[in-house]
């Protein structure tokens, strides 16, 4: 049974989420403050954290940064803040996904399932939707075809495969692939994504593997 930690101080939201998630067989833990959330992640080992940004004691962004100092537990931000800058800030701080309130239960459940089945890069291989990556051999196949990639194309694909279904921001990808000195040169990233899609035979207008979130980043589609 997967354990979901709900971090929110609004009793109606907590009740709504608890009922919805328990009906799907999830074990539920609740934290109503930022300090309590950090402590529960450290002691309770949840499988997914649902984090509201508007907490009474700490801003959710600070809570997220604190969690990331010691844990890589998947964090889905649930917030009324719908500005692009808020989303980018949370994702850059380590959030795996960002859902704007109000949201539908089926959508949230789908996003939770994505996080629960995410494959870490420490695994020896990755397999999803016909895409296979064998990390030790540095071999990539897609729909049975061997795909030859440059070093940076392969690095981009590996970054996206770390958390399939989760967003990686432009800044995260730029720093991982080119280093901090190139974190603002996003045109390099757009070119690299286009080249990777071409290698995979991917249609940018109807992507089946790599989704673009304009102004934010990219995610590897896993459902």
Image (tube, helix red, strand yellow):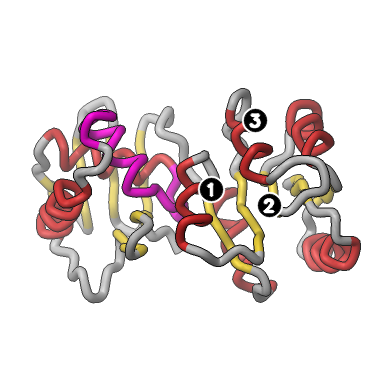
Quadrant including the C terminus: bottom left
SS for dot 2? loop
Is residue 172 on the magenta stretch? yes
Name the residue carrying label 2.
53
Q: Give the residue pinned by disc 3.
A: 66
| Residues at marks 2 and 1 touching, judged by CB atoms closer than 8 Å | yes
Residue in front for this viewpoint, 179 or 1: 179
Q: Position of residue 199 (x, y in %)?
A: 11, 54
Observer-nearest residue: 199 or 189? Answer: 189
Drawn side of residue 161 relative to residue 21, left or right: left
Tell me the distance, in whole angstroms, between the alpha carbons under discs 3 and 1. 12 Å
Structural crowding at the residue carrying mark 3, measured as other residues with C-alpha within 10 Å and reported as few (<14), some (14–19) or many (≥20): some
Q: In this view, does 1 lie above or below 102?
A: above
Q: Residues within 10 Å of mark 2 (few under 14, many from 20)?
A: many
x 61%, y 52%: residue: 76
Q: Please report the residue visible at 40 percent of the width from the left and 33 percent of the height from the top.
A: 121
Instruction: Name the residue tied to disc 1.
Output: 90
Which quadrant of the view contains residue 182? top left
Q: Which region is colored magenta?
A: 163-182
The Cα–Cα distance between marks 2 and 1, rounded to whole angstroms, is: 9 Å
| Image location (x, y in percent) of residue 205 | 22, 75
């Amino acid at each position: 049974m997967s354990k979901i930690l709900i971090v929110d101080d609004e009793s109606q939201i907590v009740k709504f989420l608890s009922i919805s998630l328990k009906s799907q067989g999830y074990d539920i833990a609740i934290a109503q403050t930022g300090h309590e959330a950090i402590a529960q992640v450290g002691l309770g080992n949840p499988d997914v954290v649902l984090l509201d940004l508007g907490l009474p004691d700490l801003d959710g962004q600070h809570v997220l940064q604190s969690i990331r100092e010691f844990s890589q537990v998947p964090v889905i931000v649930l917030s009324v803040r719908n500005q692009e800058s808020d989303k980018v800030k949370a994702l850059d701080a380590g959030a795996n996904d960002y859902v704007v309130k109000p949201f539908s239960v089926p959508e949230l459940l789908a996003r939770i399932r994505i996080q629960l089945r995410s494959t870490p890069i420490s695994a020896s291989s990755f397999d999803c939707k016909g895409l296979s990556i064998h990390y030790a051999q540095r071999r990539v196949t897609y729909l049975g075809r061997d795909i030859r990639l440059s070093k940076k194309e392969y690095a981009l694909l590996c970054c996206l495969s770390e958390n399939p279904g989760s967003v990686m921001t432009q800044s995260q990808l730029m720093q991982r692939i080119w280093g901090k000195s190139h974190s603002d040169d996003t045109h390099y990233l757009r070119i690299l994504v286009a080249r990777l899609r071409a290698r995979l035979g991917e249609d940018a207008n109807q992507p089946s593997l790599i989704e673009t979130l304009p102004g934010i980043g990219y995610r590897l589609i896993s459902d």
